[in-house]
Amino acid sequence: MKYISTRGATETLGFEEVLLAGLARDGGLFVPETWPVIPAETIASFATKPFAEIAVEVIHPFMAGEISRDELALMARDAYAGFDDPEITPLVNLRPGLTILELFHGPTLAFKDVAMQLLARLMDHVLEKRNARATIVGATSGDTGGAAIEAFRYSKRIDITVLFPAGRVSDVQRRMMTTPKEKNVHAVAVRGTFDDCQALVKAMFNDHAFRDRVDLSGVNSINWARIVAQVTYYFYASSRLGGQPPLSFAVPTGNFGDIFAGYVAKRMGLSIDKLIIASNENDILPRAVATGAYAMKDVVPTSSPSMDIQISSNFERYLFEASGRDVDLICSSMASLVATGRFELRRLWPRLQADFAAASASEDDVTACIKTTKERFGYVLDPHTACAVVAAERIGGNNETVVLATAHPAKFPDAIEAITGTRPALPSRLAHLMSDPERFETLSNSLSAVQDFVLRHRRVTSRAT
């Protein structure tokens, strides 16, 4: 399996190179040259397989020839061993026609754990094989940072710095990044938005001298391995719910990574009815579906901060596929976005509307959904998942809809308490989180300031031999 860039100027690479590179050197995102298709009989066999075995079947075609099936199986079992539910991503039927897929049973109570725990093991495996080191710099709107730091905090070959927007993540989200004591992990509060943090990371990748100097790698959903690991739970949900008739999926998404994983699952042969983009008041994706224009606005802080985004990086991967891999169209669209804050979908608009439905939820919608769901079903949704329930009910459909529950409500205790009157408790294993001392630095929205921080905190003297 080989990979190409959505911008067309980077040489074809294998899985291991793509894993370590993160972002292509031409500024594009990696996609496979061809989409593997899983045979129908193999998909049918998933009904009797545990999550880790389904993951191997789904992921291994993307790394064939570089990482063996047995090596991947060992890493998958290890990655998911720390989850607090034996099903890893259990399903909860909320009412007829609506099922919740709980993706928050990992160590940091967010869906990012499903991919990040495996990603850390894959990267350590490749670096060990190459006797190499890497420096990870990532941006987070809330959950990615904690999941990444937790996954990589014990790595002997990786230093990691995570940028988060100062004052725009929940206390629990922040503390999951700032309380780990390991010397290879660093949290940085940037005076700006998530989009500013993401732009800083992309700028570091595009500074090739800096990139090579620190052996830069990325773990945001720009990294292809993050996307492919998330494809697994679409197949898992279908296997547990019978697979026929096809399920619809409602996905709370800001960076378009989680729902693009659903699109990948469909390309791989999974029968899916609707893929529903769920957004909060920062509704750039639903507006793009409705109007045919991807047009940025100011970011509005909401109770679902992980979706407080206006630049959905993985949308570029979808546009690349929808356009028939038209590199010129992608490059011109991304250039227009940088220059003017918008681009027109034109001939791709009908295709987008055919591939996705979309809806956004206001803060009042979220409040009403959380309150009503608790009163009617005794189930507490986090604000992101509430956006997806709102979207699922607004879009409707004839078949079962699976809502991806991307975070545990205890990650947003203030918002949940204000709505329900009850403060959700963290699992006992995280009881220390709110009292442990924090360690982080606050920086301006400055590329040079962040690059200097990364250089000063690299463990260059501990290079493995």
Image: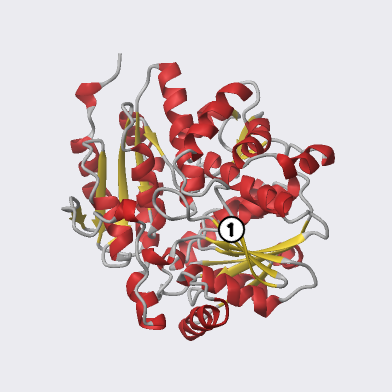
Q: Residue at x 52, y 43 (%)?
A: 226
| Secondary structure found at label 1 | helix
Which of 377 and 9 lies nearest the eye of the viewer? 377
Seen in the picture, residue 24 relative to 314 is either above or below; the reply is above
Residue where numbered disc 1 is placed: 333
Q: Quadrant of residue 405?
A: bottom right
The crowd level at tag 1 (other Cα within 10 Å; few <14, some 14-19, many 20+) is some
> Is residue 359 in view from this perspective?
no
> Residue at the spot x=79%, y=37% of the render?
42
Quadrant placement of the C terminus: top left
Residue 193, x across and y down, in percent = 34, 64
Residue sitting nearer the eye, 443 or 249: 249
| Percent coordinates x, y for residue 385 in the rendering | 52, 68
Image location (x, y in percent) of residue 288: 62, 70
Q: Amino acid at mark 1?
A: Ser
Q: Residue at x 57, y 37 (%)?
A: 9
Q: Nearer the viewer, residue 28 or 177?
A: 177
| Outermost residue to the top | 465
| Residue under the point 41% across and 42% down | 206
Q: Nearer the viewer, residue 161 or 380?
A: 380
* 446 relative to 31 in the view: left or right: left
Does residue 423 appear in the picture of this structure? yes
Q: Looking at the figure, which quarter contains the N terminus?
A: top right
Q: Position of residue 305 (x, y in %)?
A: 40, 67
